[in-house]
Image (cartoon, rainbow, N blue to C red):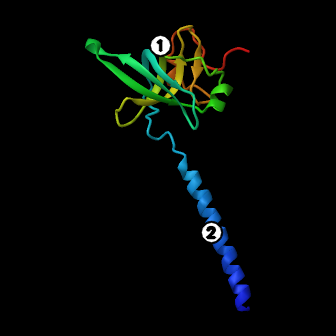
Amino acid sequence: MTGNQCSKGFRWRASLAGALLCVATASFAHHSTAAYDQTKPMRLSGTVKEMQWTNPHSWIQIVVSGKAGKTTEWAIEFGNPVINLRNGWKRNDVKPGDKVSMVIYPQRDGSAHGTLATITLASGRTLDGAADFVPKAVQKLLPPGSQPGPAPK
């Protein structure tokens, strides 16, 4: 093998290794939902402070009144706009000032963060978070007669 052939083989392998490293790094960039305890769904009811219809995730800031009038602001993550549209959402379904009830999976560290399982609007309409299904543990927390899922077409 000549020096030139060896050099070409090395460059090809180095380029391939670099490309694989880039792909591997990008795949780790997206986080999982491991920070949320999906074995302990909880209900929150309150007033929407802000709705962020953004990529890679949408967010709802909700102010929840607790005991003795103390309020807590929760940050609730849910699907990206494309997933939300597939689940029957419209960009203006949730607005600041709206009264909503939601079932979330809370963050494991006990902070006021969570990921959305379902949200029930003041109209009674229930929408899913990013999940394609609603587990039975969450269904038990929904208001009687509500059906999670996309809005009728």
**In terms of secondary structure, where does tag 1 sit?**
loop
Query: Label 2: few (<14), some or many (≥20) within 10 Å?
Result: few
Residue that protrudes farthest toward the left in the picture: 68
Observer able to see residue 141? no
| Residue where numbered disc 2 is placed | 17
Q: Residue at x 54, y 50 (%)?
A: 29
Nearer-N-terminus badge (1/2): 2
| Type of amino acid under label 1 | Gly
Measured as percent of width and height from the top left, residue 78 is found at: 54, 30
Tell me the residue that label 1 is attached to: 97
Closer to us: mark 1 or mark 2?
Answer: 1
Percent coordinates x, y for residue 70 in the rendering: 29, 17
The N terminus sits in image quarter:
bottom right
Seen as rendered, the residue at the extreme bottom is 2
Quadrant in which residue 134 is drawn: top right
| Count of labels in the image | 2
Is residue 72 visible to the viewer in this orientation of the structure?
yes
Left or right side of 112 for 8: right
Horizontal arrangement in the rendering, residue 77 relative to residue 130 (left or right): left
Q: Quadrant of residue 149?
A: top right
At 34% across and 33% down in the image, what residue appears? 110
Crowdedness near tag 1: few (<14), some (14–19) or many (≥20) residues, C-alpha within 10 Å: few
How far from the left and from the top, in percent, is residue 113? Answer: 41, 31
User: Type of residue at label 2?
Assistant: Ala
What is the CA distance from the residue labelled 1 to the residue labelled 2?
A: 52 Å
- The image position of residue 30, as x and y in percent, is 55, 46
